[in-house]
Image: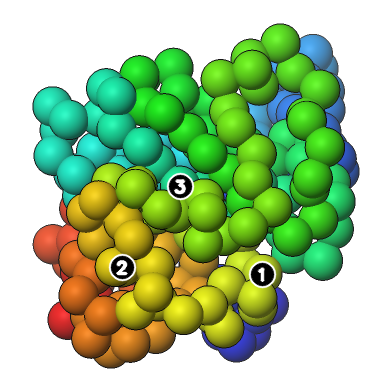
Amino acid sequence: MTQGNLRAAPGWGGSCLPKDTRVLAAIAKKHPANMPVLAATIRSNSLQRHRVVGAVRRAIGPDRLVGARIALLGITFKAGTEDTRDSPALDVAHRLAAQGANVIACDPSVVEPIESTVDALIDLCDDPYAATAGAHAVVVLTEWPQFQALDWNRIAEAMRESRCVDTRGLLDGKTLRGAGFKYVRTGNGRPGIPNGFEPDA
């Protein structure tokens, strides 16, 4: 894999890779075989979703998540699909809702309610401007190019508080800051950056 193929993300998902890694881990445990890299990779992927929630909490204030309106842009596991199976974006939505946030999600390919026992806690909206209106924070979770073309000045004016957590490194920091956003994105691994997120200065 070349450096050009490495992209920021809230973790991997979908119907194949998570299942395959779990199966390999189960086979290794059964035989047994020592596969520390595989075990660490699965754990790291799970922790990345937790880190995203932590970044949102820090962005709005650690004691202000309960009752906060959080707008999520993207809930599929990647752009260009309708698939929400084992989607890290959907998992982040669940975690935020479980911690008391009012979660509203907008995804270009998902317009029908998602089948899940907990998705009654997540509202779906087909208009990103309506989804972000009145929000305390917007979180970019799927790398849909449509989100780059949004009018971020218009979004900032309609939000309650102009905060953006970009887990994909999709947006232009200068544009967001110019619109008045407090903008943080997935970091590039530099020392001293907590949990992989950094202000885009």
The C terminus, quarter of image: bottom left
Kind of residue at disc 3: Ala
Q: Secondary structure at mark 3?
A: strand
Alpha carbon of mark 2 to alpha carbon of mark 3: how far?
12 Å
Report the residue marked by disc 1: 144
Report the residue marked by disc 3: 71
Q: Earlier in the sequence, mark 1 or mark 2?
A: 1
Q: Secondary structure at mark 1?
A: loop
Alpha carbon of mark 1 to alpha carbon of mark 3: how far?
15 Å
Kind of residue at disc 2: Ala
Of 100 and 51, the residue lying toward us: 100
Rendered residue at 31%/56% (across/down): 159
Rendered residue at 27%/22% (across/down): 66
Report if the CB atoms under discs 2 and 3 are less than 8 Å apart. Answer: no
Rendered residue at 57%/60% (across/down): 128
Q: Is residue 86 left or right of residue 47?
A: right
Report the residue marked by disc 2: 156
User: Where is residue 156 shown, x and y percent of the image?
Assistant: 31, 68
- Within 10 Å of disc 1 (Cα), the crowding (few <14, some 14-19, many 20+) is many
User: Where is residue 174 shown, x and y percent of the image?
Assistant: 28, 88
152 up-or-down from 12: above or below: below
83 up-or-down from 179: above or below: above
Of 130 and 26, the residue lying toward us: 130
Q: Foreground mark, 1 or 2?
A: 2
Rendered residue at 46%/80% (across/down): 151
Q: Is residue 17 visible?
A: no
Kind of residue at disc 1: Trp
Q: Secondary structure at mark 2?
A: helix
The N terminus, quarter of image: bottom right
User: Where is residue 42 shown, x and y percent of the image?
Assistant: 59, 37
Q: Is residue 95 left or right of residue 58?
A: right
